[in-house]
Image (spheres, rainbow, N blue to C red):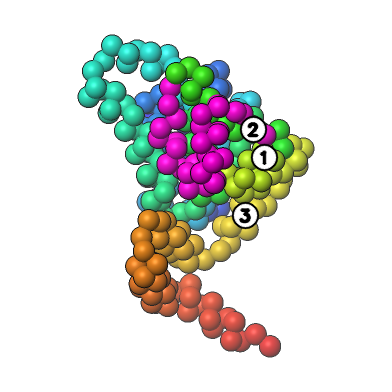
Amino acid sequence: MSDKVLYSAHRGIARITLNRPEKRNALDSEMIACIRQTLAQAAQDTAIRVVVVTGGGQDFCSGADLAALQRLQDAGAVENLADARRLADLFLDMRRHPRPIVATVHGRALAGGCGVATAADIVLATESAQFGYPETKIGFVPAIVMAILRRSVAERRALELLTTGEIIPARTALRIGMINRVYADGTFETDSESYIAQLAERSASAVALTKSLLYQMDGISFEAALTAGVQTNAIARLTDDYRRGIEKFLKRP
C-alpha cells in the first residue's frame, strides 16, 4: 500500500490518515484506491468498532489532484468516466461499511475532500475548520459530492453552496446540518477522542444494523421502510449483544 494513506488499528479503533500534506492531501487515483483498501481491511477485522478518517498536516483534504485531472484532459470519455467512478465507489464503500465512520476535520475540507469528510457517518470538526465546494470557480461541477450534500442540507442551501463555491466555517456547517460537532481547536484532540471512545463502547452489532437500516430507508416508501425495520428488529433480537443487554438491564436493582 502506498504511503499516501496510513492505517493503524488499536483497541477497536481503526485510523485512516490521508498522508499527502505537501499536496494538502489532494486525491489522485492511487490515493483513492488506498483509502478503499484500508476501509476493506477495517471491515474484515472483527475487532474494529469505529473507523476514523483524518488528514495529515494542516488540512483534511483539498479535493481532487488538479494535476492528475489535467493529465486526463486529452483522454477519452471512457477513461474520464472510469476516473470519476473511482470517487463514487469510495463514497459507496463508506456508506456500505459495516462500522461507523467518523471524520475528524481540521483545516480545509474542500470539493472532493469535503465529499470524503461528509461521506463519513459522523463529522467532528475544529472551530477553525472550513468546508466548501469551489469547483464552479474553475469551470468544474461538484457532481459526485452533490449526492452527499443533497442528503444533508436543504435544497436551496445546497444549490447556493454548490453554485457560488462559498467556503463556510465549521459553525455554519454545523448549523445547516453538514457536520455533527464542533470543538475548540485547543481541545479538539481530547474532545474528539472522547466522542470516538464512547461510540466504540456501543454494541457493534446494534450500531452496524442501525447504520445499514438507516441508509436502506433512503429513497424507499414509508411502508417499505417499516417492513425493513421489522426485519432488522427481528434480527437484532437474535444477537448476543441484545441478549446480554436485556439480561443486564433486568438484573438492575
Q: Which residue is mark 2?
A: 168
Q: Is residue 118 left or right of residue 83?
A: right
Query: Quick check: is 162 in the magenta stretch?
Result: yes
Residue 21 vs 10, above or below: the answer is above
Find out whether the residues at labels 1 and 2 contact each other: C-beta distance under 8 Å.
yes
Of labels 3 and 2, earlier in sequence is: 2
User: Of the residues shown, which amino acid type is indicated by label 3?
Assistant: Ala
Q: Secondary structure at mark 2?
A: strand
- Between label 3 and label 2, give the one nearer the viewer: 2
Of labels 1 and 3, earlier in sequence is: 1
- Between label 1 and label 3, give the one nearer the viewer: 1
Residue at 38% x, 44% y is: 93
Residue at 40% x, 60% y is: 217
From this viewpoint, which residue is outermost toward the front?
Answer: 156
Give residue 172's mark.
1
Point out residue 202 in the picture as x, y percentages from the top left corner.
56, 64
Q: Which residue is mark 3?
A: 197
Q: How far is disc 3 from disc 2 in space, using C-alphas?
A: 28 Å
